[in-house]
Image (cartoon, grey):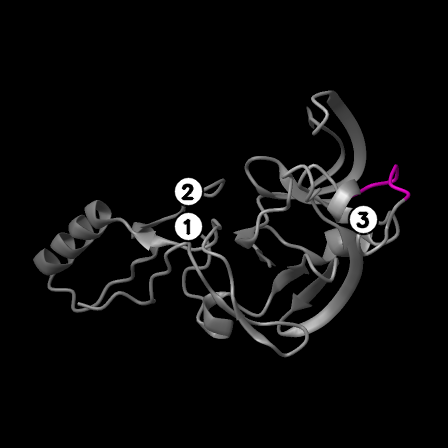
């Protein structure tokens, strides 16, 4: 009885970065899938009764985060991450976007404010959905509520972190994130956000390190 893919466990992943270095990501993240033993038991029982010699596990997997059905089933290339993904380096304050193994866009970004503990979480996540012209609401590190209108929004963490344009931002230096970073999101220039938004797809992995 053969299930047709290798399970992933929402933890650490090997990645060859834009610079050609191989790294292991942090153990945080939501990208991946596991097999539900309850569902799989029924699938196997039904297969045995029917005399089936092989079955697919696709209907028996689950995930964590926004997509409870699991993300990445059947993906084996690039150590399970696949060839279409976004890469974000906090130290370089840059994002790279790949399609079918090719770099299609890169952009300077500003990530979460380090000094206040609002760092953009590291790990491997996935694009939950994409939305145009919306208002992001929350509580800033000063304790005050904010409401920010953005034109492009692609969240990858349920707590509210994602890619978006930041028309209000004036500090785009490579050290801005230390004391003048975001509330956890990946801020993008207004001229970069449309390209990134169009390049991203739902369930696409987002690797942050």
Figure quadrant of the N terminus: bottom left
Q: Is label 2 or label 3 in front? A: 3
| Residue 201 horizontal/vertical position (percent) | 63, 54
Give the alpha-carbon distance from disc 3 to disc 1, as whole Å: 35 Å
Residues tagged 2 and 3 counted as in contact (Cβ below 8 A): no
Q: Considering only vertical position in the picture, is 13 above or below 16?
A: above
Front-lying residue, 169 or 158 = 169
Q: Give the range drawn in magenta.
A: 165-170
Q: Is residue 115 magenta?
A: no
Res. 179 in view: yes
Residue at coordinates 72% horizontally, 58% vertically from top-left?
Answer: 199
Q: Residue 13 carries which label?
A: none
- Chain-order first, disc 3 or disc 1: 1
Residue occupied by mark 3: 176
Residue 2 falls left or right of residue 136? left
| Residue 184 horizontal/vertical position (percent) | 66, 41
Q: In which quarter of the image is residue 179?
A: top right
At numbered mark 1, what does the secondary structure look like: helix, strand or loop? loop
Q: How many labels does the image show?
A: 3
Residues tagged 1 and 2 counted as in contact (Cβ below 8 A): yes
Residue at coordinates 79% horizontally, 60% vertically from top-left?
Answer: 107
Residue occupied by mark 2: 68
Question: Secondary structure of the magenta portion, mostly?
Answer: loop
Residue 146 falls left or right of residue 20? right
Q: Which mark is residue 70?
A: 1
Residue at the front extreme, as displayed: 115
């Amino acid at each position: 009885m053969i299930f047709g893919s290798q399970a992933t466990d929402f933890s650490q992943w090997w990645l060859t970065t834009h610079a050609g270095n191989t790294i292991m990501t942090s153990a945080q993240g939501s990208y991946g899938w596991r097999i539900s033993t309850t569902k799989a038991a029924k699938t196997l029982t039904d297969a045995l009764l029917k005399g089936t010699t092989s079955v697919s596990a696709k209907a028996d997997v689950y995930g964590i985060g926004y997509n409870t059905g699991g993300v990445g089933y059947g993906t084996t290339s690039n150590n399970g991450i696949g060839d279409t993904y976004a890469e974000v380096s906090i130290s370089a304050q840059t994002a790279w976007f790949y399609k079918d193994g090719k770099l299609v866009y890169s952009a300077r970004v500003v990530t979460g404010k380090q000094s206040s503990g609002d760092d953009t979480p590291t790990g491997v996540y996935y694009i939950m959905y994409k939305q145009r012209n919306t208002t992001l609401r929350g509580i800033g590190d000063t304790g005050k509520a904010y409401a920010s209108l953005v034109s492009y929004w692609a969240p990858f963490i349920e707590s509210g972190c994602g890619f978006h344009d930041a028309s209000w931002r004036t500090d785009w230096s490579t050290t801005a994130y230390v004391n003048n970073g975001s509330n956890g999101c990946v801020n993008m220039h207004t001229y970069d956000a449309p390209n990134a938004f169009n390049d991203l797809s739902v369930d696409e992995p987002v690797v942050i390190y």
